[in-house]
Amino acid sequence: MNSWFTVKVKYTKQLENGSFKRVSEPYLLAAMTFTDAEARIYEELGTTIRGEFQVTGIARTDLHDIFQYDDTETWFKCKVTYDRMDEEGEKAKTVSQNFLVSASNVKEAYERTVESLSTMMIDFNIASIVSSPIVEIFPYREEDVQSPAMKKIAVEDDIEERSPVRAVFSASGSDFDDTEEEVFASDDAEETADEASEMEDTYSNEDSE
């Protein structure tokens, strides 16, 4: 059963000014196990990162769907809540799901999440939106025949300008509470200042009440 994993990779990166800097960057990928996630990140980055790189941490990540637009590489994590009735139809249970959406800013992330969930037959509330440090996403591959993840691309007709193309990435097996998150980290994994400040750009309905 396929799930989403966040894999942190440390390597020496060449900056635009030609200098080199040691960085730690998170990547999101679909895999069946921690071992599969580690093997796949080496496969995906082996031809793109010059020199050696090291996997410093792998964490199973709670994401229901990913909405990727092709006009930006900036990511936001959106927490959506809605009420679901029990089997007797008498008592409502609040359900929380996390979505990842690419957008230029918080406002656009909100609008794109609403657009992407517009087909839901129930009322929902976007409880929070936070910026995400994810560098790149490696979704389910068709050759992974055992994975139930799906990729759907919706393309709207061009009118005056070309509308952004939206891709939806889903992976089953990732619907669990944050408190149940499984984490693997190597002994020499280090927290960086960038990671500590990754949630500074935040939107929350609770703050506006």
Image (tube, helix red, strand yellow):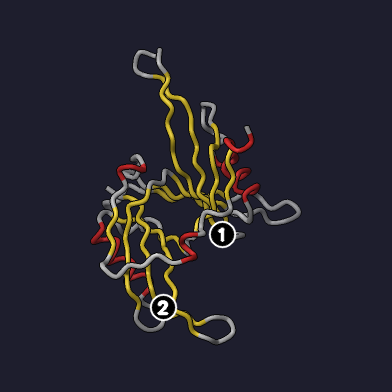
Q: Residue furthest bottom?
A: 18
Q: The residue tagged with tag 2: helix, strand or loop?
A: loop
Q: Provide residue 2's location: percent of width, then percent of height.
A: 30, 50
Marking on residue 74: 1
Q: Give, as a three-letter code, the residue at label 1.
A: Thr
Relative to 138, residue 13 above or below: below
The relative height of residue 207 versus residue 24 in the rendered view (above or below) is: above
Residue 147: assigned label: none
Mark 1–mark 2 distance (CA, rounded to whole Å) = 20 Å
- Write the residue at 28% across / 50% down: 182
Which residue is at the front of the view, 197 or 78?
Answer: 197
Q: Amino acid at mark 2?
A: Ile
Residue labelled with disc 2: 49
Is residue 111 found left or right of 10 in the rendered image?
A: right
Percent position of residue 198, x then y: 51, 58
Residue 173, image x and y in percent?
A: 31, 44
Residues packed near mark 2 inside 10 Å, few (<14), some (14 to 19) or many (20 plus): some
Work out whether mark 1 precedes mark 2 in sequence or the reverse, and give the earlier one: 2
Which residue: 25% across, 55% down?
Answer: 33
**Decide: marks 1, 2 in contact (CB < 8 A)?**
no
Point out the residue furthest to the right here: 160
Rendering quarter of residue 25: bottom left
> Which residue appears at 54% of the width and 41% of the height?
128
Q: What's the residue at 48%, 33% (across, down)?
A: 81
